[in-house]
Image: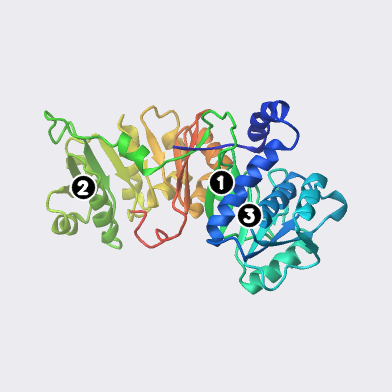
Amino acid sequence: MRYFYGADAIRDAEAPLLASLPAGKLMRRAAFGLATAIARELGTVSGKTVCAVVGSGDNGGDALWAATFLRRRGAAASAVLLNPDRTHPQALAAFRSAGGRVVETVPSATDLVIDGVVGISGSGPLRPNAARVFDAVAASGIPVVSVDLPSGVDVHTGAADGAHVRPALTVTFGGLKPVHALGDCGRLDLVDIGLDLGPSDLRALDAADVAARWPVPGVTDDKYTQGVTGVMAGSATYPGAAILCTGAAVAATSGMVRYAGSAAQEVVSHWPEVIATPTYATAGRVQAWVVGPGLGTDETAAAALCFALETDLPVIVDADGLTILSAHPELVAGRSAPTVLTPHAGEFERLAGIPPGDDRVEATRKLADRLGVSVLLKGNVTVIAEPGAGPVHLNVAGNAWAATAGSGD
């Protein structure tokens, strides 16, 4: 499990270390980790050329100290100071003492650029002078390593609404921040600087976390104790949705899968182990329902959704089921059995009345609270929230390969 911490939580964790360590020690510790990560990126340090783009404050100080350490190992180091009068004085003095040069623009022969413009206290897009620097860097194809987070990207939401840095690598310190899951940070390197951080309310699932929770059949289990999944999906227009959805239930190792709908013949031809019937009334014993993919939104489809939600069984609602539910949110009001809605952004907007916006975590949490159900907002980072003050979980795909027709089914 990976935990993500807001800026305030990081500052609170840093405070006792800052109070107990000599002045500047924590910054140098972080910068040494940054320099080590950059050295790995370069492969060979001696003879390479690095340039730090330096803003005001501690983020710029980290970049200057890292460039100083690299200079001491034989790299040529330069720095572009975006706010010369507000540059971290101790870091700048050390940089110059090591032989680093202050320049107006990034040298064309630079092998790697360090983005030290803004850190976790920054907000908004890059200022025009910084944007010009990084536009030139991007045009030159020079790889960038960002300090803590890509400058111009929001630390809490990962949103980038204007000019921002697109790094090959982001090196962060102490703990991951929301941007590292929600934003485009390139590859990620976490440097341990000794922060005492407990579990947070924003978490990302790893494969090991899923595996640990996956039900494993016992020696006395049978097809009923392993769970019977009922599927209401597909129609004459979209029989493939029924095939894909029932196939997913089979692949998820349900003890038995029952299909109820108009695509029964097509489903059985692809999945002969599925027990298929034309209607939910004849489906037989079911322990959880999946309703919606390719189902349509007519009265027959609405009746199927109502039937599932009126039971005391767990229900997953997707696709057309969400469209029906957006017109009839009362169907889930007061429901005590587990209920999971799985919208993409467009379906989310129909349910919530507004798009998810930049803060997808908060939007998902609010919709879950409003409807009293679990909401899984799909995307390259999937956000999963339950009603109440519990944790929000993320599934970080890091790509959009699943954004194809039928993958949600």
Q: Which mark is residue 146?
A: 3
| SS category of the residue bearing label 2 | strand
| The one of 261 and 389 positioned closer to us in this rendering | 389
| Residue type highlighted by circle 3 | Ser
How far apart are the alpha carbons under marks 2 and 1? 33 Å
| Precedes in sequence: disc 1 or disc 3 | 3
Residue 384 on image: x %, y %: 46, 40
How far apart are the alpha carbons under marks 2 and 3? 51 Å
Q: Give the side of residue 79 with respect to residue 277, left or right.
A: right
Image height check: is 297 above or below 237? above
| The one of 317 and 306 positioned closer to us in this rendering | 317
In the rendered image, which quarter is residue 317 located in? top left
How far apart are the alpha carbons under marks 1 and 3? 23 Å
What residue do we see at 78% from left, 59% from top? 127
| The one of 156 and 280 positioned closer to us in this rendering | 156
| Residue type highlighted by circle 1 | Arg
| Residue type highlighted by circle 2 | Tyr
Q: Nearer the viewer, mark 2 or mark 3?
A: 3
Image height check: is 35 above or below 197? below
What is the crowding at mark 2: few (fewer than 14 residues within 10 Å), some, or many (at least 20)?
Answer: many
What residue do we see at 42% from left, 60% from top? 403
- Quickly name the residue at label 1: 360
| SS category of the residue bearing label 1 | helix
Image height check: is 221 above or below 181? above
What residue do we see at 72% from left, 56% from top? 125
Q: Considering the image in quadrants, where does the N terminus appear?
A: top left
Q: Give the side of residue 273 with respect to residue 96, left or right.
A: left
- Quickly name the residue at label 2: 259
| Precedes in sequence: disc 2 or disc 3 | 3
